[in-house]
Each structure stands twice: as structure tokens, then as C-alpha cells.
Image (cartoon, rainbow, N blue to C red):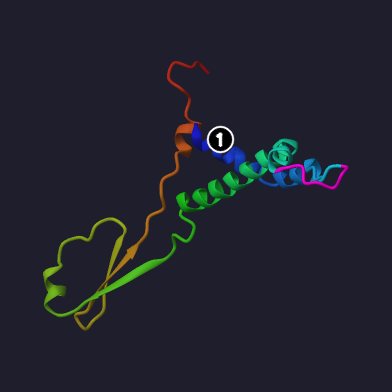
Amino acid sequence: MWFKIRLYIVSLILLFPMVIVSKIHCQCFDSNGRFIGYYLLAYNNIIPIISLVFMLLGMMFFWRFCYETGAGAGVSTQVSVTGEEATRRTRKPPDGVVRAADGGGNVAFVVRRRRSSLPVGRFLERPAGVAV
């Protein structure tokens, strides 16, 4: 549920600057030329302040969404093993590791980062007990 709420806030991220520009109240001085104070200035601009908070939250959620979806997951790391270590490593490497060998007895293990699993499947499934 929180995933959907975060994506909804991200989808509204372009709305918040427009709300800030249209609703900001920039009058800082009264008719006598004195500063009206921070409390009254914040009170007059409560909607732009809330929009600013949600805009910052939307940017944080967007960066987290990019991290969770594995942006840049195509990066791989190569580890080379030579000599006796290559002969000892005869078992199958774990998932996500590809074993490559050349003709000279050198073995290289390429470790591929996995993409994080998103909970997309559970949103598409029907709840139990719901008739079609």
C-alpha cells in the first residue's frame, strides 16, 4: 500500500511547483514598512509550504524507486582466479555468477548484480475469495 502512495506522490511532483508559484504570498512588510514576522509569513503561505514538503518527499521517493528497481543493474564485477585456485573451484558457482575460462588455465568469475524484486505481481493478483 505504501508503494502505491509513494508512486502517487511522485506522479504529482510537477504539480507542486505550479501550486507554489500560484499560491505564494510574498508580502513581508505591513503598511508602515515593518517586517510582519516569520509566524504570519508562514501562516499566509501554508499551502506553498505543504507543497514544498510534498515536492521534496516526491524527489526522495523517486530516487528510492530508482534504487529499488535497480537502475544501473547492468554493471558487473570480474574476479580472476589463476593456478591452483582455479583447479579447486570445480563446483557450480551460485546464481548470478557466470564462470568463464580461457585455454591457459585461468578462470574468471563474473558477478552480475540482481535486480531487486518489485511487488508488482501481488498488485495484479486477485484477492482470495473474490469472484470473477
Depth check, front residue: 128 or 26? 26
Location of residue 4 with respect to 63 vertically, above or below: above
37 lies left or right of 54: right
Residue bearing the label numbered 1:
5
* 43, 1: nearer the viewer: 43
- Left-right relation of 5 to 79: right
Q: Residue drawn 49% across and 31% down?
A: 1
Give me the residue at 47% from left, 53% from top: 67
- From what the image shows, is residue 100 above or below residue 46? below
Residue lying at the far bottom in this picture: please name it.
104
Q: Is residue 85 left or right of residue 11?
A: left
Magenta-highlighted stretch: main secondary structure? loop
Three-letter amino acid code at the position of disc 1: Ile
Q: Would you identify the image quadrant in which residue 111 lies?
A: bottom left
Residue 74 at x, y percent in the picture: 44, 63
**Measured from the top left, where is residue 122 in percent x and y?**
45, 33
Would you say residue 112 sits in the magenta stretch?
Answer: no
Q: Identify the residue shown where x is 44% and y is 16%.
A: 129
Q: Which residues are magenta?
A: 31-37
Find residue 13 and report its horizontal and vertical position in percent. Answer: 66, 45
**Against 127, is 80 above or below?**
below
What kind of element bears circle 1? Answer: helix
The structure residue drawn at horizontal position 58% and vertical position 49%, both measured from the top left corner, is 59
Q: Quadrant of residue 106?
A: bottom left
The answer to whether residue 51 is left or right of residue 127 is right
In reply to whether residue 32 is colored magenta, the answer given is: yes
Counting the numbered discs, the total is 1
Taking depth in this image into account, of 77 and 63 the one nearest to the observer is 63
Q: Residues within 10 Å of mark 1 (few under 14, many from 20)?
A: few
Q: Position of residue 19 (x, y in %)?
A: 75, 42
